[in-house]
Image (cartoon, rainbow, N blue to C red):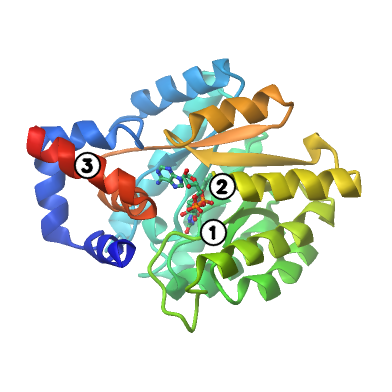
Amino acid sequence: MMRAVLLKLSESARLKRWVTARKTTRRMSRKFVAGEELDDAVAAARASNSSGLKVSLDLLGESVTNAAQARAACDSYLRIFDRIAAEKLDANVSLKLTQLGLDIDEALCQELVESIVARASGYGNFVRVDMEGSAFTERTLNLAKRVRAKTPAVGVVVQSYLRRTESDVPGLLAAGCRIRLCKGAYKEPPEIAFPAKSDVDANYIRVMKLLLPSGIYHGIATHDPRMIAATEQFAAERGIGKDAFEFQMLYGIRTDLQRDLVCRGYTMRVYIPYGRDWFPYFMRRLAERPANMFFFLKNLFRG
Ligand code: FDA
């Protein structure tokens, strides 16, 4: 119930203005967001790299409303790749297609993604296309496959809460796509997404078992110790090496588990978001865990 309310509120422009204007809430957002500038993200990435963690940088922003905004986001992503190379960071980039105009002009979006993937490829780097709400699933998967057919330095995300995911995966694997598997963070109706957490988790394990034996390097993105244990156990049973896939977690969440997996010889990538448009991302993180909401409210009324 609270999850649904928070996800609905994440779309409210009024609440966004109120929350992002406040010093207290901006400070609180730092629990999950590295900062508002690229320099903040670079500093967080450097600190993560020095603890043995790989990184994926995400410039926060989604649902642009005109082509100029999409082009500006594209330019920012090109600059991020230049900066990663200049700073010699062990980092790739995650981006959202609605930030690059998917919902206003799909051809423009594809052109922009192609230019970003070409820049990444020139540096021997990689672009991960995040997955957004179900209105964009089909278009996101298809666009990523089309771009990948030209330049392979791009992968996508699938969400285990979606009923369709298990049947999407074989096509993506046949196209050679590197996949990040996550549970899914948006508000979806029961016809589209499993309402029960037990079904989302069971599907996560089913999809993980499709991904790992594929011979393609995938990302297992979760903070859930049960999903991690199931992955470790399946990989051990199948003789799949620790270097054949990576675990991924979000900045600021379960840093103890992140360190533990690195100590045990796994590759761990931390997703580091930054930028001024942090409100929807922050609300999705609050929605994932009631304790985060209580922390937020407690500090809000203190500050
Ligand atoms: P689950 O929600 O069951 O949580 C398991 C445990 O993890 C909790 O008990 C708690 O300990 C901890 N935890 C989880 N979320 C927390 C939080 N917000 N604060 C504190 N503790 C928390 N989604 C999407 O729809 N599209 C995408 O592209 C991505 N990309 C992505 C990248 C990466 C690297 C990760 C790790 C996640 C995503 N996600 C995402 C988000 C994902 O779909 C999901 O919402 C969160 O990862 C939470 O799900 P868990 O798998 O962690 O399990």
Q: CA distance from mark 3 to mark 1?
A: 23 Å
**Label 1 CB-ligand 1 distance < 8 A:** yes
Q: Hey, what amino acid is under mark 2? A: Asp
Q: Please indicate whether residue 245 sits to the left or right of residue 54 in the image.
A: right
Residue 266, picture quadrant: top right
> Crowdedness of circle 3 by 10 Å Cα count: few (<14), some, many (20+)?
some
Examine the rendering and report whether any part of residue 246 can be seen: yes
Q: Residue at x 69, y 75 (%)?
A: 167
Residue labelled with disc 1: 183
Q: Position of residue 248 (x, y in %)?
A: 59, 41
Mark pair 2, 1: CA separation:
10 Å
Name the mark on residue 296: 3
Q: Earlier in the sequence, mark 3 or mark 2?
A: 2
Q: Looking at the image, tell me whether mark 3 or mark 1 is earlier in sequence order.
A: 1
Q: Which residue is mark 2?
A: 224
Q: Are marks 2 and 1 in contact (CB under 8 Å)?
A: yes
Q: Is residue 147 left or right of residue 19?
A: right
User: In the image, residue 100 lies at what x, y percent?
Assistant: 41, 57
Which residue occupies the foreground of this view, 71 or 15? 15
